[in-house]
Image (spheres, rainbow, N blue to C red):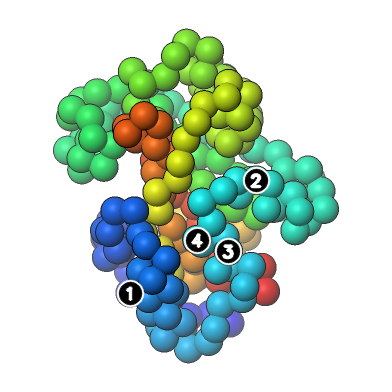
Amino acid sequence: MFIKLPIHTKHDERMERIKGMRVDEMLKAINRIEERIGSNLSNVQKILLTTDGSVTRILEILTKKPIIIETKIKTSIKADENLARELRIKPDEIVNYRVVHLKNPSDKALIFARSWTPMERLNEKIKKDLTSLDIPIGKILFKYKIETRREITSIDVINADDEMAKAFHVESGNPMLSRYYNIIHEARVLIRINEAFPLSSFH
């Protein structure tokens, strides 16, 4: 099923801006998605959009295969005003920007993920792993026994941009389920993450 959605001029434009969505707010967001697409999301899709646990572990259970990370972009950027506000840092602070595909070995992407991490909030060991190794973020945090919580900030259906379309071998503009969430450590945003997957996946 192909549904053409309004083009967003910015990737997170029109996404819900609620900080730390409550369960009832997530349910309302899912209802709005279902109204827009004219059908119900599967239980698996709902879980992937609303979980505050490890997406990697969920995918491993669903596929019964190990999940690997394929890094597509790994670089340092300066935070603009919008990103600085989301991360609660000062503009121009250095942020690690990473684009990865979560996938089974030799298979196409299951989840497309972007992450933004303020570098000054990482110790040297975590910084080295994050910037040099293809390891899921959740496993890096577990490795160093970092106590965190996930704060979901938005859930929506969007149009695939060119990077997403390439990751999933679909046309640009195809409907994608997307969410943003923050990984919080000691009351600070340690990592901001955007995850997306095709509306046609996980039925």
Residue under label 1, please give it: 6
129 above or below 31? Answer: above
- Which amino acid type corresponds to the residue marked 3 in the rendered image? Ile
Give residue 75's quadrant in the image. Answer: top left
Q: Dot 3, crowdedness within 10 Å: few (<14), some or many (≥20)?
A: few
In the image: residue 32, left or right of residue 74: left
Name the residue: 24% across, 23% down: 93
Mark 4 vs 3: CB contact within 8 A: yes
Mark 3 or mark 2, earlier in chain: 3
- Which amino acid type corresponds to the residue marked 4 in the rendered image? Thr
Give residue 159's quadrant in the image. Answer: bottom left
In the image: residue 102, left or right of residue 112: right
Q: Nearer the viewer, mark 3 or mark 2?
A: 3
Residue under label 4, please give it: 50
Mark 2 vs 1: CB contact within 8 A: no
192 above or below 78? Answer: below
